[in-house]
Image (cartoon, helix red, strand yellow):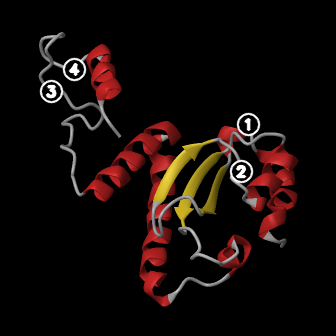
């Protein structure tokens, strides 16, 4: 047992013994940069000021491990982020936190079943669509949605998809 800020001390010996590389480690962590209750998957990245992630990076020698990020939102004005992350969630956010923990477990199950990249693509798209209030059509094969394309004559080519994405305002 150790403090979150020293996560690397607990994880490093197990990582060295059981992992072949950073893709064998999935870290679930809180994230101030996501709204309360949001869950996102990410491969690698910085520490974002998160001391537990910093400890893992220092002890493992890499930050390229897989992540399930659980949104806790930003603290109210005047509240120190260090105090905010150590305080239990306000009662009005408790339901969102409980739902996020269940969603993180579902995301982990998808990682185990589908592999990280496919789970990340599916999970983050579902989360984005839910935030926008839209539901994407399901592909009959479960992987690719075929749709009419102007250049390829039947399905959207990578070039068409990329050019559409490049012109999209975010």
CA separation, marks 1 and 2? Answer: 18 Å
Which residue is denoted by mark 1 in the rendering? 21
Q: Quadrant of the C terminus?
A: top left
Q: CA distance from mark 1 to mark 3?
A: 38 Å
Q: Helix or strand or loop: what does disc 3 sit on?
A: loop
Q: CA distance from mark 2 to mark 4?
A: 37 Å
- Residue 157 placement (x, y as % from top left): 26, 16
Helix, strand or loop status at disc 4: loop
Q: CA–CA distance between discs 4 and 1?
A: 35 Å
Q: Which residue is mark 4?
A: 156
Locate residue 135, reporting x and y percent.
21, 51
Q: Mark 3 or mark 2, which is nearer the start of the sequence?
A: 2
* Camera-nearest label, 2 or 3: 2
- Location of residue 23 with respect to 161 vertically, above or below: below
Residue 149 x/y as whole percent: 15, 18
* Mark 2 lies on residue: 47
Q: Answer with mark 1 or mark 2, whichever residue precedes in sequence.
A: 1
CB contact under 8 Å: marks 1 and 2: no
**Badge 2 element:** loop
State which tag comes first along the sequence, 2 or 4: 2
């Amino acid at each position: 047992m150790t403090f979150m800020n020293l996560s690397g001390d607990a994880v490093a010996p197990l990582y060295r013994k059981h992992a072949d590389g950073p893709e064998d480690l999935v870290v679930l962590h809180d994230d101030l940069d996501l709204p309360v209750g949001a869950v996102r998957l990410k491969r690698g990245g910085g520490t974002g000021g998160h001391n537990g992630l910093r400890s893992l990076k220092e002890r493992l020698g890499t930050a390229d491990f897989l992540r399930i990020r659980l949104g806790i939102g930003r603290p109210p004005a005047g509240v120190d982020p260090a105090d905010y992350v150590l305080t239990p969630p306000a009662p009005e956010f408790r339901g969102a936190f409980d739902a996020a923990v269940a969603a993180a477990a579902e995301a982990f199950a998808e990682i185990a079943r589908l592999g990280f990249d496919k789970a990340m693509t599916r999970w983050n798209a579902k989360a984005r669509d839910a935030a926008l209030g839209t539901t994407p059509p399901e592909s009959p094969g479960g992987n690719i949605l075929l749709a009419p394309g102007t250049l390829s004559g039947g399905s959207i080519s990578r070039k068409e998809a990329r050019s559409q994405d490049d012109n999209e305002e975010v």
